[in-house]
Amino acid sequence: MSEMTNKAKNTVLNEMTLEFDAVSDNESFARVAVAAFVSSLNPTLEEIADIKTAVSEAVTNSIIHGYENIYGYGKYRNTRPDFQTFHPGKVQIHCMIQGDILHIEIADQGKGIEDVEKAMEPLFTTKPELERSGMGFAFMEAFMDELEVTSRPGEGTRVRMLKKLGTIPWIEDED
Amino acid sequence: MGKGKEASREPFAEKQNMEEFKVIDNCLMVRLPEEIDHHSAGFICEQADWYIVKQNVEHVVFDFENTRFMDSSGVGVIMGRYKKISCFGGKVFILHADKQVRRVLRLSGMDKIVEIVEDNQNE
Ligand SMILES: Nc1ncnc2c1ncn2[C@@H]1O[C@H](COP(=O)(O)OP(=O)(O)OP(=O)(O)O)[C@@H](O)[C@H]1O
Ligand SMILES: [Mg+2]
């Protein structure tokens, strides 16, 4: 690849941890928080869009699959039925900036995934009735440089992603 | 419960960037919100389906003019509506999709089943 600057590749420059309730109200907060954290690296708008999408996918998965919380605390424009109960649970985000590399780890202690390899196939979803398209992992893979998923049924799921900032051109078929 | 429910609408009226649904001839026009994620997708699906069933809508037009973010939840919204109308010959049109939205549409293969209307001022 292109020549890389060797300055402090392995020095941890910045780190942050977040924990929040596993409800849909927090999806927007989570991706915006990570995007703000990354701003010190002067990411391009495209890189921010990539990061926000990947974070949104992983956090949403923890909420709707890990803890099966379909509706948020707030009645978003009255869509939540009155009888909805919440499954208590938290989502953790850990971010680390190392040189020009962003590491993101998103974890839950929800129900976990039986077959991770199968779950990561594009279009595979266990919740088609909820209008899920099975594209979440495919987006994380496409928008980040590395993706690693570990999960244990009954214990939870951990998604590790990495993105190198400042080098990835915007892949777009411009006309 | 019907009337009381109307009164308990969210107190914070999100005036701008609010979803908007309008039927023109046999088309349902949906102006999408600023961010389409799991949190906002449920309402869009619910409303759009109501119009599709109750107002005999043939085509659906999604206008992304105000939309700055969309994840796979948005793909689910479009795919779900496409499935509902395509068996009756209906089409889904996409207007004003920016780069991020287009990329998500392309990666998910949605660009093959919906009509993305080009607007000359590229974003
Ligand atoms: N945190 C998690 N806990 C439990 N199961 C998960 C988790 N993340 C993903 N899964 C499983 O992996 C499947 C695939 O996830 P993916 O995000 O690719 O698709 P989806 O969430 O079903 O649909 P989409 O993301 O397109 O709305 C899910 O349907 C679910 O069964
Ligand atoms: Mg998903």
Image (tube, grey):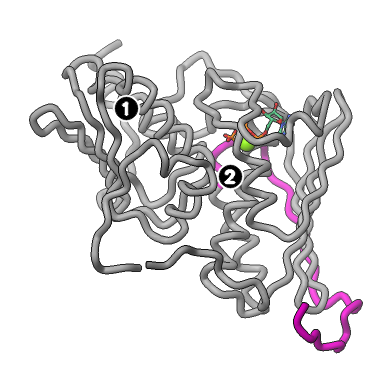
Classify 10 Å Cα crowding around label 1: few (below 14), some (14-19), many (20 and above): few
- A82 with respect to B2 (left or right): right
Which portion, as a residue range, is magenta?
A1-27
Query: In percent of the image, x 73 and y 65: which residue is there?
Result: A163
Q: Nearer the viewer, residue A20 or B20?
A: B20
Where is mark 2, residue-wise?
A26
- The image position of residue B4, as x and y in percent, is 27, 18
SS at mark 2? helix
**Percent x, y of residue A137:** 68, 42
> Front-most of B86 and B79?
B86
Q: Would you name the residue on which mark 1 appears?
A: B8
Query: Which residue lies at the image location 38% right of the left edge and 59% below the top edge?
Result: B98
Label 2 resides on the chain identified as A
Q: Label 2 neighbourhood size at 10 Å, few (<14), some (14-19), many (20+)?
A: many
Look at label 2 and name its amino acid. Asn
Relative image position of residue B48 (x, y in whole percent)? 30, 27
The residue lying toward the viewer, choosing from A59 and A75, is A59
At x 31% / y 42%, what residue is drawn?
Answer: B115
Kind of residue at disc 1 = Ser
B122 to the left or right of A40: left
Q: Quarter containing ligand 2? A: top right
Farthest residue, direction top: B1
Tell me which residue sits at (65%, 71%) in the image: A168
In magenta segment, residue B38 = no
Q: Is residue A69 above or below residue A8?
A: above
Report whether the residue tagged 1 is closer than 8 Å to ligand 1: no
**Residue extending farthest left:** B25
Q: CA distance from mark 1 to mark 2?
A: 22 Å
Identify whether A1 is placed above or below B100.
below
- Chain letter belonging to callout 1: B
